[in-house]
Image (spheres, rainbow, N blue to C red):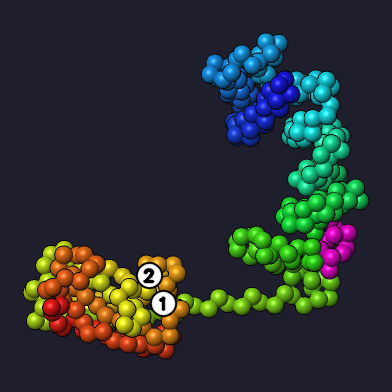
Amino acid sequence: MPAFYAIAAVMVLLTLFAVTRPLWRPRAVVGVGVTATLALGTALLYFAVGTPAALDPAQRKAPETLADAIAQLEAELERNPERAEGWHVLARAYASEGRTQEALRAFAQAIRLAPDADVLAEAAETRARGAADRRFDAEAVAMLRRALELQPAHQRARWFLGIAQRQAGQPAEAARTWEPLLASVDPQTAASLRPQIDAARVDAGLEPLPESPAEPADPGLDIRVSLSPEFAERVPAGAAVFVIARAAGTVMPVAVERLPATAFPITLRLDDSDSPMPAARLSQLDKVEVLARVSASGNASAQPGDFASSPIVVEIGKADPIDLSVDRVVP
């Protein structure tokens, strides 16, 4: 249990340090005070509403600073040195204070006890940050390669290994290391990564990556709905216009839009985003039947007395703008 509390204390203090860090620059005393107060309050709240009976009374004094929490964790790890998670947290705490060599020794203990891709990548990054030239040395590269052996899709290890290869004058290897990331990161990250891959390829005498094929545009239907003049004065307030595309001979729409019946003509576009059912989309059909209906009640279901257009069958992807004239009464 003491190891858990020491680890938790360090993690809380690290988090609070990051949150309150902006206060440290203009007024360090304020930053220290806020951090210590929040940490102490967190610990006291736990003691008040947590499970005090399970606590060792000797451990009830909450650490007031990150240094105190680190000292507690160091003492606990002397008593129980086989706690991999404790060494990992201690390594992070040392790194946050710029104690690189101590951080690397703690990382080494964590890796010895429980090799993990995240820990290996963090250790390699800490080693590079602590180097005078900020370069990944052979030991850091070995850590990154081992991380990728454990978890080939590990993004952070793959990114750092590519940087190390670029630093070592191995642009082709860097490009090969980075390229799999394009399929696993979000589009914005991929867009920023791609130029770096292309630059590495060019430095290696290779062609840039081929342009990604443009996503095909969703097929859609451009529609203009007009209202017969004889119905213009008969549309009640609150009426709605439903513009519907459906497979010929069916009732359920594959695309539908509802608009207020306030001004005609109405122009719109129906596409897959207007599908009421994900499994039935406009783009899955070659032809559809299109119609418009003015609902006096505003309900989707057709009612006697509604106004409607005659259905028109059109081909998807080849249809010119469609004109629908609402000129008949639903019987």
Q: Earlier in the sequence, mark 2 or mark 1?
A: 2
Whole-percent x, y for residue 107 in the image: 82, 37
Q: Are marks 2 and 1 in contact (CB under 8 Å)?
A: yes
Q: Which residue is mark 1?
A: 282
Q: Residue at x 13, y 78 (%)?
A: 331
Considering depth in this image, is 230 or 138 the residue closer to the camera?
A: 230
Secondary structure type for disc 1: helix
In this view, 176 is above or below 206 = above
> Which residue extends farthest top?
57
Is residue 236 shown left or right of residue 182? left
Whole-percent x, y for residue 57 in the image: 67, 10
Q: Residue at x 31, y 70 (%)?
A: 257
Q: Is residue 230 visible?
A: yes
In this view, 37 is above or below 117 = above
Q: Which residue is mark 2?
A: 274
In this view, 32 is above or below 121 = above
Q: Crowdedness of circle 1 by 10 Å Cα count: few (<14), some, many (20+)?
A: many
Distance between the alpha carbons at the discs numbered 2 and 1: 9 Å
Considering depth in this image, is 86 or 55 the residue closer to the camera?
A: 55
